[in-house]
């Protein structure tokens, strides 16, 4: 890879989730030295089930991640509990053709394996907890739990919903409890005759019951999730598989069958929470990406996707920037976050609202809500048209970022591979 010698800077990324790994790869491709700190002994996925939209898949490919047969391409629909369609999420044919379908069903560990395989050598430092971040106009100092201090020109906080970097920059902000919980699992049991190529999100009066095709290491299977209101102040003590079974029973084939076919060891549960979107992400020489910037409910099914996009865009914005120059750094960080904020805030806020509408509507209003959703195009407009619009916009943003990147002297010839 070629650099302009004077432009090479030092970037520290905190957190090896999708945001941090994508950021580290993109910053490396931009020609800077990058270090990725992860507190755990390995970069480990927090859960199994995952779907990705085409924009993050495109970003992953540009970062050098192997996206071949990464997941099962699915057309996604919202339905009522009787199987009647409320929404069809339709992406243009060329997008479906180019990126392997509208919504890609996969297992998170497979994505992590592929991200790790594409990370440049010696970038990832596991067992490194960052405890404190300090900065001034000349640089950034990260205090590690073993007492060492790491110096950098820029720090990228990819440290998730409980981000230390976010807290350091912008102070404490309360978690927003959605008072929902979700159970999810997956199976490769071929005896369940579910239709491939579909992601079905269904709702009855109080529960969401959903399933989607997946591919994992060349094998086809299905993942599912069920979601209901749950008081966040209570402790959950039930059995995961039997709780999921009870919730799934209200839904048509194949959801109950998929849950029944799932090994209880592959069932997980999460409480759903987020934080309100920030007005600004970056301060001084520090910025945020992924859940650190915009924690997002799984209702969006886009948190990891947006995290990946953030990581991709921050590296592209730092290409050709002299990181020793404070003014240039500020301009680059502002240029990074300005288009990202409305996109991510819209997704997180919509995910929050959908959770409230579907699971916290007062009982007398539920039949009215469902009649509106069944008989009007409201949900088609809010979800079925707005979501594809956002995805297409992000694909265009990536094309523009690539064009800018290719025009940066030196990095245009970068091969993007690990060094
Ligand atoms: C049930 C469920 C289903 C979901 N489904 C989808 C889906 O279908 N599609 C989708 O796109 N998104 C989905 N999401 C959302 C997605 O999982 C998150 O948005 C995504 O993981 C955020 O990635 P991230 O890299 O920003 O943060 P994280 O994945 O949280 O990674 C943060 C990393 O930072 C590390 N870290 C934290 N603090 C420190 C520190 N001080 N020092 C060093 N390391 C630190 C952590 O150990 C962790 O590895 C789902 C979420 C849930 C809960």
Image (tube, rainbow, N blue to C red):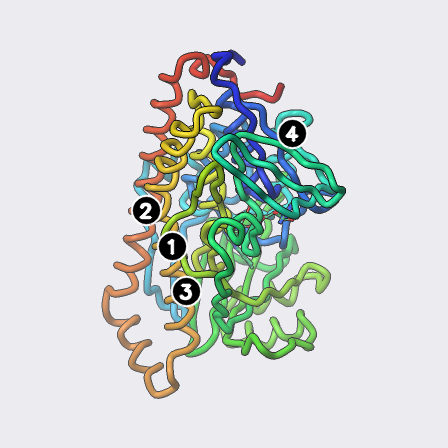
Q: Are marks 4 and 3 in contact (CB under 8 Å)?
A: no
Q: Nearer the viewer, residue 139 or 415?
A: 139
Q: Nearer the viewer, residue 92 or 381?
A: 381
C-alpha span from label 4 to label 2: 32 Å
C-alpha span from label 1 to label 2: 9 Å
- Taking the image as shown, residue 126 lies to the left or right of residue 199, namely right
Disc 4 crowd rating (10 Å Cα; few below 14, some 14-19, many 20+) is some
Task: Name the mark on residue 390.
Answer: 2
- In percent of width and height, residue 194 lies at 53, 57
Q: Are marks 2 and 3 in contact (CB under 8 Å)?
A: no
- In percent of width and height, residue 407 lies at 36, 17
- In percent of width and height, residue 373 lies at 30, 71
Q: Is mark 1 within 8 Å of ligand 1?
A: no
**Chain-order first, disc 2 or disc 3:** 3
**Position above or below: 228 against 45:** below
Which residue lies under the disc numbered 1?
347
Q: Secondary structure at mark 4?
A: loop
Q: Are marks 1 and 2 in contact (CB under 8 Å)?
A: yes
**Position above or below: 34 against 288:** above
- The mark closer to the camera, 2 or 3, is 3
Q: Is mark 3 within 8 Å of ligand 1?
A: no
């Amino acid at each position: 890879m070629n650099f302009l010698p004077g432009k090479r800077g030092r970037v520290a990324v905190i957190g090896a989730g999708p945001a941090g790994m994508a950021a580290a790869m993109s910053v490396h491709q931009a020609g800077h030295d990058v270090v990725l700190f992860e507190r755990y002994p390995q970069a480990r996925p927090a859960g199994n089930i995952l779907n990705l939209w085409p924009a993050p898949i495109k970003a992953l490919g540009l970062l050098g991640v192997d996206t071949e047969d990464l997941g099962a391409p699915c057309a996604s629909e919202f339905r009522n509990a009787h199987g009647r369609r409320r929404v069809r999420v339709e992406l243009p044919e060329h997008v479906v053709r180019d990126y392997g379908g509208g919504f890609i069903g996969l297992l998170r560990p497979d994505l992590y394996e592929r991200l790790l395989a594409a990370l440049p050598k010696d970038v990832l430092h596991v067992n490194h907890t960052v405890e404190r971040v300090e900065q001034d106009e000349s640089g950034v100092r990260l205090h590690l739990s073993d007492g060492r201090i790491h110096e950098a020109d820029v720090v990228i906080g990819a440290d998730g919903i409980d981000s230390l970097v976010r807290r350091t920059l912008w102070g404490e902000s309360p978690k927003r409890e959605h008072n929902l919980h979700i159970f999810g699992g997956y199976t490769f049991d071929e005896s369940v005759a579910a239709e491939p190529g579909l992601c079905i999100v269904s709702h009855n009066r109080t529960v969401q019951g959903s399933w989607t095709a997946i591919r994992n290491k060349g094998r086809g299977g299905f993942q599912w999730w069920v979601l209901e209101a749950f008081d966040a102040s209570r402790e959950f003590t039930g059995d995961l598989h039997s709780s999921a079974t009870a919730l799934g029973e209200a839904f048509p084939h194949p959801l109950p069958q998929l849950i029944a076919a799932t090994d209880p060891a592959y069932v997980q549960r999460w409480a759903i929470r987020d934080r309100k979107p920030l007005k600004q992400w970056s301060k001084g020489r520090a910025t945020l990406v992924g859940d650190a910037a915009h924690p997002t409910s799984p209702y969006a099914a886009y948190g990891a996707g947006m995290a990946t996009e953030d990581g991709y865009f921050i590296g592209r914005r730092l290409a050709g920037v002299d990181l020793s120059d404070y003014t240039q750094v500020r301009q680059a960080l502002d240029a990074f976050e300005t288009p990202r904020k409305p996109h991510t805030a819209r997704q997180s806020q919509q995910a929050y609202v959908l959770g409230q509408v579907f699971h916290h509507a007062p009982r007398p209003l539920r039949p009215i809500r469902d009649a509106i959703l069944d008989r009007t195009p409201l949900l088609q407009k809010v979800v079925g048209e707005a979501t594809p619009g956002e995805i297409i916009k992000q694909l265009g943003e990536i094309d523009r970022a690539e064009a800018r990147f290719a025009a940066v002297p030196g990095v245009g010839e970068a091969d993007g591979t690990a060094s």
